[in-house]
Image (spheres, helix red, strand yellow):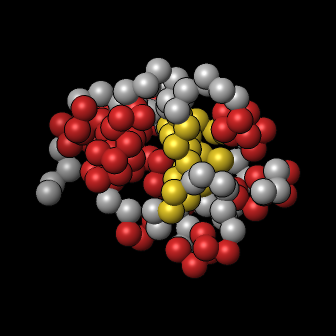
Amino acid sequence: MPHTKANFELSKAMVESVEEHSPAEVSAEELHALLHTPGKGAVVVVDVRPAEDFANFHIPGSVNKPFQELNYTQLISDVAPHAKQAGYVFVFVSAQSPDVDDLAAREYINEFSKIHHHPPEEGAVGILLGGVRNYLQRYPS
């Protein structure tokens, strides 16, 4: 495809859209509070590490959706009931962050935007800073 001014502007708009709708950064303390404070809204923690790693250790209540196998359309459908609740937060986690959790969160935001014709609410999609190990060191199960 030849580079034209229209193509460049479209690409620039797409980049700005991705930057504008980046995942929120969630600290271990913030995630712990969200998971343990009644009435804070629905929290869905998606661990994108391989299944073997998830089986060894994970954040209690998290769901394993390995990054290489992740179907974003299906994931959006699976969490639709949570996404309609006020104050829902969808947090992607990996071994260390930022890592594939950031890529997964951005892909989720992009797919959500395509399906719903608008991005998720600001702060509704995040990544866990420091990763799963950091969280579990601070908050052992």
Compared with residue 132, is residue 31 higher up or lower down, i.e. above or below?
above
* Residue at figure coordinates x 50%, y 62% from the top left: 64
Compared with residue 108, is residue 37 higher up or lower down, i.e. above or below?
above
Q: Is residue 115 left or right of residue 16?
A: left
Q: Is residue 19 visible?
A: yes
Badge count: 0
* Residue at figure coordinates x 29%, y 53% from the top left: 74
Q: Please tell me in which quadrant of the rendered image residue 114 appears.
A: top left
95 and 87: which one is in front?
87
36 and 72: which one is in front?
36
121 and 81: which one is in front?
81
* Residue at figure coordinates x 47%, y 48% from the top left: 105
**Horizontal and vertical percent for residue 36?**
71, 35
Q: Locate the C terminus by quadrant.
A: bottom right
Q: Locate the N terminus by quadrant.
A: bottom left
Q: Residue furthest right?
A: 138
Q: Please tell me in which quadrant of the rendered image residue 131 appears.
A: bottom right
**Horizontal and vertical percent for residue 139?**
82, 50
Q: Is residue 98 visible?
A: no
Q: Is residue 131 left or right of residue 117?
A: right
* Residue at figure coordinates x 29%, y 45% from the top left: 77
Q: Residue furthest left?
A: 1
**Horizontal and vertical percent for residue 34?**
66, 33
**Horizontal and vertical percent for residue 33?**
73, 33
Q: Is residue 27 left or right of residue 5?
A: right
Q: Is residue 127 left or right of residue 71?
A: right
Q: Residue furthest bottom?
A: 52
